[in-house]
Image: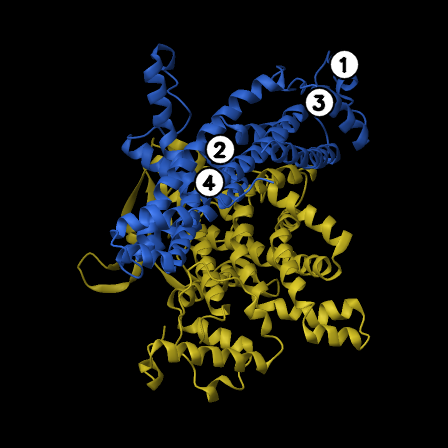
Chain colours: A yellow, B blue
């Protein structure tokens, strides 16, 4: 709903509905791309018309994607999701710079150090403001993972400090970190794990695996789903029957079992990159089914549209009609389904790595970081081992927020 | 009714064959087998030869291997487990019962919460209770079961109010009476049920809300109200009966999700169910166990879907079982 107050806000519901219908007409005429939008099933939120109608003039000359964006921008939760994702993915790209330590750096003498977020001091002993610093950490002799702050030694937090080398997007090489403290001091914002590795840094590096797998996986499975769904819906007949039975089998089996059995097929003697690729491929091979089924349904109705018949009459090849004329019209719905399916890939990676058949140490992923918390004693004593789980939750939630907003925005019954 | 049942059971056969065949193929294609580790030990040659003879493990021909699995399986003989050298069927039946117990209680949990909350959210649309329900459903759809399970285990470990894992008390189980055993098992069931039931609850609640909103705008609801029936009587007797039907079909669809989610939940809570069994069997390359578990999973799914359809036919007289 809009915060704007336009004269149209005061009209009666009947007039508003009439206006909405008229606009739908206008929008539909703008581009052949829009009839699609009409075939989208009603949103789960029920049948209410959230209409803050546009004037005729402003509806003209807007592309469907622009309308989608305008409607999305009004949705506060969706935008919140979008901003969260932007933040998460940006920090994933800049992981090396933002993380004070490399993913494989281990302060072996400091296992399970508690989070230091609250142990950053801004005032010195006399109470006057100083540059932020942390105290030195010294293990209590004779006890495992018990520490005390050594108040005699201070380590100021240095910004743009030099540390371990890293690459940003495989290209930019650097050793400058956003912040850090001089050796032998340590700064563990979210604490350290059993090997004395910085959880904050490893979450950033782990995001490179766990978050990117969502994007790569959805790209592959959407392409597969569009292709197979397009072929299935366009040709019909025996092809359609066979492909749809395959889809049903895939949807009928509990995915995680299938993923595990498939993963088992590849053995375990692989490099991290190979494991990553295998995981993406497995997840995408299972994930395309949902997309294909939805797209098939849309293609079934689209292929009867006049412009497709016209294209066929012009003698275009089937491949060209599917790829150039039909599939682009399914795009808005494809985007919605894809956005809502990203969590499947993120959670799939997490599950595999958590079960020990995904990303292996010393590489970090949100899933394999949680393995340590499987031990009930560790979990109880060092609850900060759960932090990666919180990030999984946030990422999945943000994708769901965005996907939900996109679905509402792509629904023609809610005019922007 | 009879033809319906026969047709559905016949339709399940290709599904079973395809799924077990794919599983067998992937097991054959996976590197190594159960015997690899035994080969390193001395005095195992006879045993290895015997196993290879019995299970045709040295053949890489998928069709051949599948046939040698299928032939006895059709007679109900799923072979012996490699790692526990006991008949697979006896190992699986207990695990299956545990998984059924967990998924069953998760279903009850999600339905018992989703229906009243969904109705309330629809009736008080856009009010605070609707917003709260919206928040709960977002939370439930987004929280990863790995994380949720662990948070609850942490909660159990810190407060000591609930057992932090397992299916029953390890120490006192043997000394318990029947009633105490039931109570103890239920006690262990609480946390895994919450984890597994929450995601289903979120889905059902959303569905229930939107169906209810749809139904409440119908003319016959207004008529019923105009007759002078009270609001809640109309909701209970007229609206709910119609709004609940799509939920029942959703139940059939969500079974696969439920069983997949059960794997992780069982793993974290040390719940001795089918999920953790499949995982263990895969890790130790215990082929007969994997094959039988997958078969049982598909059978459970087919039966679950069948039950959903029958339920729908019972509660909705417009549905005919053809």
Marks 4 and 1 sit apart, C-alpha to C-alpha, by 45 Å
Residue B8 against residue A17 in the figure, above or below: above
Give the chain letter at badge 2.
Answer: B
Say left or right for A65 vs B206: right
Asked if the residues shown at circle 4 and circle 2 are in contact, with their CB atoms under 8 angstroms apart, the answer is no
Quadrant housing the N terminus of chain B = top right
- Residue indicated by mark 3: B74
Asked if the residues shown at circle 3 and circle 4 are in contact, with their CB atoms under 8 angstroms apart, the answer is no
Structural crowding at the residue carrying mark 4, measured as other residues with C-alpha within 10 Å and reported as few (<14), some (14–19) or many (≥20)? some
- Residue indicated by mark 1: B50
Structural crowding at the residue carrying mark 2, measured as other residues with C-alpha within 10 Å and reported as few (<14), some (14–19) or many (≥20)? many
Asked if the residues shown at circle 4 and circle 1 are in contact, with their CB atoms under 8 angstroms apart, the answer is no
Asked if the residues shown at circle 1 and circle 2 are in contact, with their CB atoms under 8 angstroms apart, the answer is no
Question: Quadrant location of residue B5?
Answer: top right
Q: Is residue A361 visible?
A: no
Q: Nearer the viewer, mark 3 or mark 1?
A: 3
Give the chain letter at badge 4.
Answer: A
Dot 4 lies on which element? Answer: loop
Q: Does label 3 or label 2 sit earlier along the sequence? A: 3
Marks 3 and 2 sit apart, C-alpha to C-alpha, by 31 Å
Give the chain letter at badge 3.
Answer: B
- Which residue is drawn at the image coordinates 29% and 53% (left, top)? A118
Residue, far front: B227
Residue, far left: A126
Structural crowding at the residue carrying mark 1, measured as other residues with C-alpha within 10 Å and reported as few (<14), some (14–19) or many (≥20)? few
Same chain check for tags 1 and 2: yes
Dot 3 lies on which element? Answer: helix
Q: Nearer the viewer, mark 4 or mark 1?
A: 1
In depth, the one of A307 and B52 nearer the eye is A307
Give the chain letter at badge 1.
Answer: B
- Residue indicated by mark 2: B267
């Amino acid at each position: 709903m809009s915060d704007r107050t336009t004269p149209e806000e005061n009209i009666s519901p009947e007039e508003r509905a009439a206006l909405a219908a008229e606009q739908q007409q206008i929008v539909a005429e703008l581009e052949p791309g829009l009839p699609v939008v009409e075939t989208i099933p009603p949103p789960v939120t029920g049948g209410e018309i959230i209409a803050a109608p546009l004037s005729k003039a402003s509806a003209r000359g807007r592309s469907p994607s622009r309308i989608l964006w305008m409607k999305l921008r009004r949705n506060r939760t969706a935008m919140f999701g979008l901003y969260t994702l932007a933040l998460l993915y940006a920090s994933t790209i800049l992981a090396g710079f933002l993380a004070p330590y490399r993913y494989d750096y281990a302060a072996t003498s400091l296992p399970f150090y508690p989070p230091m977020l609250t142990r950053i001091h801004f005032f010195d002993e006399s109470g006057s403001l100083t540059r932020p610093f942390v105290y030195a950490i010294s293990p209590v002799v004779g006890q495992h993972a018990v520490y005390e702050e050594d108040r005699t030694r201070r380590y100021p937090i240095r910004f743009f400090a030099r540390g371990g080398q890293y690459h940003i997007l495989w290209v930019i090489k650097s050793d400058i970190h956003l912040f850090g403290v001089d050796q032998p001091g340590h700064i563990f914002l979210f604490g350290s794990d059993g090997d004395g590795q910085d959880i904050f840094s490893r979450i950033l590096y782990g995001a490179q695996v766990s978050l990117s797998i969502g994007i790569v996986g959805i790209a592959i499975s959407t392409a597969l789903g569009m292709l197979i769904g397009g072929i299935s819906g366009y040709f019909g007949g025996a092809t359609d029957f066979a492909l749809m039975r395959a889809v049903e089998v895939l949807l009928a089996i509990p995915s995680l079992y299938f993923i595990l059995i498939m993963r088992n097929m590849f053995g375990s003697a692989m490099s991290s990159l190979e494991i990553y690729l295998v995981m993406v491929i497995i997840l995408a091979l299972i994930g395309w089914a949902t997309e294909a089924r939805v797209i098939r349904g849309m293609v079934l109705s689209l292929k009867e549209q006049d412009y497709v018949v016209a294209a066929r009459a012009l003698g275009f090849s089937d491949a060209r009609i599917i790829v150039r004329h039909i599939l682009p019209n399914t795009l808005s719905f494809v985007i919605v389904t894809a956005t809502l399916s990203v969590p499947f890939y993120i959670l799939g990676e997490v599950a595999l790595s958590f079960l020990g058949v995904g990303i292996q140490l010393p590489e970090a992923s949100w899933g394999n970081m949680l393995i340590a918390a499987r031990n009930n004693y560790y979990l109880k004593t060092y609850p900060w081992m759960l932090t990666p789980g919180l990030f999984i939750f946030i990422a999945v939630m943000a994708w769901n927020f965005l996907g939900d907003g996109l679905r509402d925005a792509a629904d023609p019954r809610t005019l922007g | 009714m009879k033809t319906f049942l026969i047709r559905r059971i016949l339709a399940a056969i290709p599904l079973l064959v395809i799924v077990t065949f794919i599983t067998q193929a992937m097991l054959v294609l996976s590197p190594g087998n159960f015997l690899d580790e035994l080969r390193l030990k001395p005095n195992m040659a006879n045993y290895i030869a015997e196993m290879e003879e019995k299970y045709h493990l040295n053949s890489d021909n998928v069709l051949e291997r599948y046939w040698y699995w299928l032939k006895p399986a059709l007679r109900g003989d799923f072979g012996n487990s490699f790692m526990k050298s006991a008949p697979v069927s006896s190992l699986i039946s207990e695990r299956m019962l545990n998984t059924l117990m967990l998924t069953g209680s998760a279903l009850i949990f999600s339905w018992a919460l989703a229906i009243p909350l969904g109705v309330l959210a629809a009736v008080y649309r856009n009010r605070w209770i609707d917003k709260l329900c919206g928040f709960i459903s977002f939370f439930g759809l987004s929280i990863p079961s790995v994380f949720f399970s662990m948070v609850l285990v942490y909660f159990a470990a810190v407060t000591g109010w609930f057992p932090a894992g397992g299916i029953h008390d390890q120490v006192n189980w043997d000394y318990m009476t029947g009633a105490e055993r039931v109570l103890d098992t239920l006690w262990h069931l609480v946390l895994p049920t919450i984890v597994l039931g929450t995601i289903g609850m979120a889905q059902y609640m959303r569905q229930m809300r939107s169906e209810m909103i749809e139904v409440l705008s119908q003319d016959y609801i207004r008529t019923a109200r105009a007759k002078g029936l009270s609001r809640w009587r109309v909701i209970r007797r007229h609206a709910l009966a119609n709004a609940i039907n799509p939920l029942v079909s959703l139940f059939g669809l969500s079974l696969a999700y439920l069983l997949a989610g059960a794997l992780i939940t069982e793993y974290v809570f040390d719940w001795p169910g089918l999920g953790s069994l499949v995982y263990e069997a895969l890790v130790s390359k215990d082929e007969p166990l994997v094959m039988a578990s997958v078969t049982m999973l598909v059978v459970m799914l087919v039966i679950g879907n069948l039950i959903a359809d029958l339920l729908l036919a019972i509660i909705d007289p417009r549905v005919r079982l053809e």
